[in-house]
Image: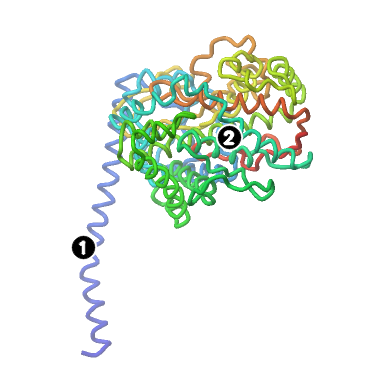
């Protein structure tokens, strides 16, 4: 058969088959249209039956909703996602807005405290983490932040005793790390430096010591001429890999059902580096006898060693440790960084705070370090106000979401005046933006965008309008741990340094949002 004859036969066959393809393609398109139409009619019927009305539609999302999702990722990568949400909600007095993804998935965004309360507490069983497990599993596996249902309950029951008050009160283990941090600061001789970079190294050092039993000592470097006091394989890659992996996790979360599009080689390699170090500590702990575990814990509480008493499953141990690492390291580093940024911009606040610390604990060579305890720190009211105000303006998790496990409602935000309930079909997403809630003028006044610790002196009860550590059954287990560590660090820095000078004119700062929030560009200042 000649080549031309063969091509002619193929062409003829194609012409014969084409009508069938066209027919089935048309049937598929019609079926999709009918399905979407039927789904929306059912939702409309249920909404009317329950007396619900939709909040304003976010028109920029279009029919597919994809432009809004892509815009969210773009803003996140530019460090302006939180501010974009803040500005967007100024256009919607209902405090809620919605969009649809291809007519299939309804996404409601809300900053209303009553709606947040419903999602996190009063209607807790109506919502779940949805696809978060798939978003976060490559790094965090099956842990307290990624699981729902019985898996989450088991995780919480396992971890709750590890955050008992007597363990939180043990702040003395922070002091050796404070000394190294202070050396770095003094080494700069009042020249401009990035304090956030040091805080992240500091918190990874304190978190690994508390969680694993040994610090990775990332603050030990050639600048100080300090040699590592221990030999931990994979130490040099851990901190950077952990940061990079979390940035990819955030991209996956904001892409919602399209999370699988974010799975590059760098993400996989960083996950391996993080897992390598965690596995080293888990294997080491599992090789200890019960007597050796007790002996190695006699000088201080070790999170991992206590978990080993409850389970010897290496995957369970690794996953839970990495889940807690996110909270123990990142939230504290972010809180410290934002606090010092605002203190450097507000010298009167810094002076007032130092005065309180000095009156209670002394300063310089006369500092009474032994008197800085969990109980005594709680008595420093202005320090507490400074941290409360920082967490108001810069909540650790500024944007979060839940997925409806059944057809349900939100109490308000629908209709023209926002007084009607909103219908939430099963599978829909409710995203709540605490960052904006904390800036609502009806709760915090016209100066809600300003850093003003004094506002907390006579603050009325705020309820769900102030939510720095989430709320309801999934309220953060480690909130007191983070606050205690942050309080200790701020108090010690106030004792050791008299002058704090801001060296960065960019304000408001760009914010890096992955699983938690910190400053995109660091905290540049001078200290002496």
Q: At 26% from the left edge and 57% from the top edge, which residue is drawn?
A: 25
Relative to 448, 250 lies left or right: left
Q: Nearer the viewer, residue 175 or 239?
A: 175
Give the residue number, with chain letter if any, for mark 1: 20
Residue at (42%, 50%) from the top-left corner?
276
- Mark 1 vs mark 2: in front: 2
Residue 64 in sight: no
Residue 368 showing in the rendered view: yes
Above or below for 118 versus 521: above
Residue 357 as seen in the image, left or right of residue 284 = right
The x and y percentages for residue 262 are 43, 51
- Residue 384, given in percent of the width and then of the height, sits at 61, 18
Residue 116 in the image: above or below residue 271: above
Q: Closer to the camera, 314 or 243?
A: 314
Q: Residue at x 40, y 42 (%)?
A: 140
Quadrant location of the N terminus? bottom left
Q: Residues within 10 Å of mark 2 (few under 14, many from 20)?
A: many
Mark 2 highlights which residue?
333
Task: Tell me the tag on residue 328.
Answer: none
Q: Are marks 1 and 2 in contact (CB under 8 Å)?
A: no
Lower sequence index among marks 1 and 2 = 1
* Quarter of the image that includes the C terminus: top right
Q: Which color scheme did the rendering employ for the protein? A: rainbow
Mark 1, secondary structure of its residue: helix
Q: Quadrant of residue 102?
A: top left
* Residue 193 as seen in the image, left or right of residue 155: right
> How far is the residue under mark 1 from the one under mark 2?
61 Å
Res 408 → quadrant:
top left
Give residue 136's position: percent from left, percent from top.
40, 42
């Amino acid at each position: 058969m000649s080549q031309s004859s063969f091509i002619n036969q193929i062409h003829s066959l194609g012409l014969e088959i084409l009508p069938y393809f066209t027919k089935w393609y048309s049937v598929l398109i019609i079926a999709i249209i009918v399905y979407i139409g039927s789904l929306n009619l059912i939702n409309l019927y249920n909404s009317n039956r329950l007396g619900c009305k939709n909040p304003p539609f976010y028109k920029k999302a279009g029919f597919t909703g994809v432009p809004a999702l892509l815009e969210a990722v773009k803003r996140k990568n530019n460090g302006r996602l939180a501010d974009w949400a803040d500005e967007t909600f100024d256009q919607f007095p209902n405090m809620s807005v919605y969009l649809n993804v291809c007519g299939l998935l309804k996404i409601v965004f809300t900053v209303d405290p009553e709606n947040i309360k419903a999602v996190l507490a009063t209607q807790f069983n109506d919502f779940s983490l949805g696809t978060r497990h798939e978003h976060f599993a490559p790094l965090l596996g099956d842990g307290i932040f990624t699981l729902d249902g019985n898996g989450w309950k088991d995780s919480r029951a396992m971890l709750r005793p590890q955050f008992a008050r007597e363990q939180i009160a043990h702040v003395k283990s922070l002091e050796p790390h404070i000394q190294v941090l202070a050396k770095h600061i003094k080494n700069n001789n009042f020249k401009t430096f990035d304090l956030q970079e040091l805080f992240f190294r500091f918190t990874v050092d304190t978190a690994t010591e508390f969680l694993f039993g040994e610090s990775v000592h990332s603050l030990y470097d050639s600048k100080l001429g300090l040699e590592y006091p221990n030999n931990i394989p994979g130490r040099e890659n851990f901190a950077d890999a952990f940061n990079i992996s979390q940035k990819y996790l955030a991209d996956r979360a904001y892409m919602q059902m399209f999370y699988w599009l974010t799975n590059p080689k760098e993400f996989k390699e960083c996950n391996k580096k993080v897992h390598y170090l965690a596995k080293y500590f888990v294997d080491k702990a599992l090789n200890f006898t019960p007597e050796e575990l007790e002996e190695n814990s006699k000088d201080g509480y070790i999170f991992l060693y206590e978990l080993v008493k409850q389970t010897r499953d290496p995957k369970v141990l690794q996953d839970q440790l990495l889940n807690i690492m996110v909270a123990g390291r990142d939230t504290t580093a972010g809180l410290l960084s934002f606090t010092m940024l605002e203190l450097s911009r507000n010298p009167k606040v810094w002076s007032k705070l130092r005065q309180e610390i000095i009156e209670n604990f002394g300063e310089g060579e006369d500092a009474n370090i032994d008197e800085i305890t969990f109980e005594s720190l709680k008595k420093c009211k202005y320090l507490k106000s400074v941290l409360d105000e920082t967490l108001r303006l810069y909540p650790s998790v500024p944007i979060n979401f839940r997925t409806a496990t059944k057809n349900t409602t939100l109490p308000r935000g629908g209709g023209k005046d926002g007084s009607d309930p909103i219908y939430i079909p099963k599978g829909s997403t409710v995203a709540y933006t605490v960052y904006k809630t904390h800036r609502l003028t009806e709760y915090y006044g016209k100066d809600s965008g300003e850093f003003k610790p004094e506002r907390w002196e006579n603050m009325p009860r705020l309820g769900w309008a102030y939510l720095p550590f989430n709320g309801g059954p999934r309220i953060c287990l480690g909130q007191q741990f983070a606050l205690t560590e942050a309080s200790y660090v701020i108090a010690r820095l106030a004792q050791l340094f008299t002058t704090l000078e801001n060296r960065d004119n960019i304000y408001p700062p760009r914010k890096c949002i992955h699983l938690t929030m910190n400053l995109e560009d660091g905290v540049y200042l001078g200290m002496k």
